[in-house]
Image: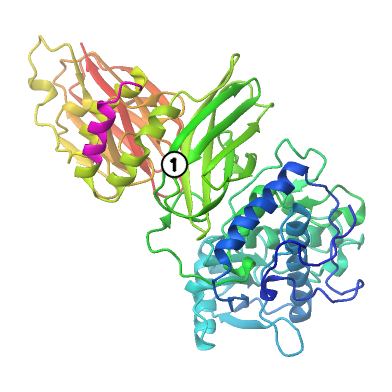
Amino acid sequence: MNKPILTLLSLISISATSVLQAAETPEKSPFTRLSVNWEPNKTDIQNAKKAWATLHAWQKDKPATSRKLHVVYVTFRDRPALPNYRERYDHILKNIQAYYADQMQAIGYPPLTFQLDLDERGKLIIHDAHVDKPMSEMTVRNSGGISREAAKKVLASKGIDIDKEHTLIVCQLPDGVGPYYGGGFSHQGSGWTCDIDGLDPANFNDLSPQPNARYGGSRGRNATVYIGGTAHELGHAFGLPHTGNGWDYPNAGRSLMGNGNHTYGQELRKEGAGTFLSPTDAMKLASVPLFSGVEFPFPQDARPGRWCGRYVAGNFEELKAISLPDGLTLKGKVQMTRPAYGLVVHLDPPGNSDYDTNAVCTALNPDGSFEVTIRRPDFRQGSLEMRIAVLNCDSTRYMLTVPVNCTSKGYQVPVLEPTICFSSVKSLWSAGKNELALQKLQELEARNDLAPETKALIPAMKKAIQPGTPPVQKAASLPESVKKIALSDVKAESAKVGYAIPYWNTVCPCDFGPVPCFKNSGYANNFIVAHAPASLVYHLDGKWKQFKADVGMPIGASGSVAFEVVADGVCVAKSPVMMDGESYPLSVDISGAKTLEIRITDGGNGNGSDWSVVANGELSR
């Protein structure tokens, strides 16, 4: 496809502040503009135009924004700035700025892109910050916080609040020590990258060796990796999650928010197809003030979720999943509690940090109705996670997450009806409105059109929403006539957790809702929630023979945990490390054991968001 001309769409106007600042720069500009060498399909282009029409109509009365991307170059005690960094990053950021504008326009939007903070000569303003610490004290993780704090102080001295703006922090630390990540949402975010000697988009075509480069190879390849990495981490700062290549564009190269950071600009060296911006990511960017060019207050009811972005309560009036041999067709209608313009669906296999997720999008009709098909022909068995995100005009999102089972009969969504039915209950409960949540459950209980498996969950939901109290009966004291008992009905002699308190058949307000659900084993009948690291100890007095449970992290949790079952001080069973939605069945012979301990570890990477669940736990004899 030829390079797009930066003109406004004929039918839709847009604020002049949001188009590319460098649009009039000559073709042989030093920032080396990349061509758009893939072609979006007609459906995605039509969806983009329809979504933008809705979004732009909502934005028309909003004032123009003064937001700009701020850049801070951070040096350390034994790592001074590399030569010509001001000129080079002027080229780098203008290259990335043009890339976003050209990709957005190719997909069907105006040439939306982020604005840069430029001086009176049109050159990038770079703020200098310094950390008086040596490289020996830095790691990938701690250098991020340390460099951001240095950047925050410098920006504050210029009247810029880093917590209310988008910022790129360039760290002069070696790759592998310096930070390389990003995160944020529509109104605030930070991306971190590292500088290397001679990094410049003018070097995309340079085939000479890059001395001492982590990735080896030519200067051109390193320009691809590091400039592509900067474009990728900025995407996270703008609120984009990881997005794989998808099945609609097999020849388009690699998605920027997948592993397209390793292919950015490679087409100039004829080493591949390059990097494209996924239509789903473009649809999300369209509501970001830094891109749209209009300003509006950030909604106060939005909160962080598992992915980049900010989320609010929402619901579907209806939603059906039609099974296909290699995917699903979703038909439904969003309950329009606030103006919305689009819907994005992700179909994600376990692991790989969402890099291999397939995603599709559609514009919403004025009444909130939609139909969209998503395919995953390479995944033939097991479970996938499906995330359905409603994109609101105020830049917030409503997310529904459900497991999808892949079998020889096609793709099935066994918990879709209960998820939809109980989503409004979850919203009320998460807001602390327990009485209204229980009232909503009573209304559902009176309905005659619900599937039996959905109705069967209502008692558990009622129990979960009401304040849970620890059980009082001890396993060792139960009469011999009791052959089986749920572990959640047995008193733990000792219950230690890493955060908050243990919860018996109820949970604190978090993303996985009143009743935990796993991708493989479905909803829990009874459960104990414990934040890792945790230890639950039970006195058995040798009177029980078997312990079994489904242990893991429910759908909606974002950490990682592992379990151990210990009988009389000896570990008798272990689980693998599990993450979002993963469960592991335990069945352990505990004959003669005096004590039973369930140990929960943080999975080896810290205990952030490590909400673990012992589901369907049972003692028998």
Residue 295 within the magenta-colored segment of the rendering: no
Above or below, 396 relative to 295: above
Q: Nearer the viewer, residue 38 or 131?
A: 38
* Three-letter amino acid code of the residue under disc 1: Ser
Above or below, 45 relative to 550: below
Q: Nearer the viewer, residue 333 or 171?
A: 333
In the rendered structure, the answer to whether residue 304 lies left or right of residue 186 reads: left
Where is residue 601, by image quadrant? top left
Above or below, 327 relative to 54: above
- Callout 1 environment at 10 Å: few (<14), some (14 to 19), or many (20+)? many
Tell me the quadrant of the picture where the C terminus can be found. Answer: top left
**Count of marks placed on residues:** 1
Q: Nearer the viewer, residue 413 or 180?
A: 413
From which residue to which does the magenta span run?
Answer: 437-449
Residue 266 spot, x, y in % from top left: 85, 54
Name the magenta segment's main secondary structure.
helix
Q: Secondary structure at mark 1?
A: loop
In the rendered structure, the answer to whether residue 286 lies left or right of residue 248 reads: left
Above or below, 310 relative to 521: below
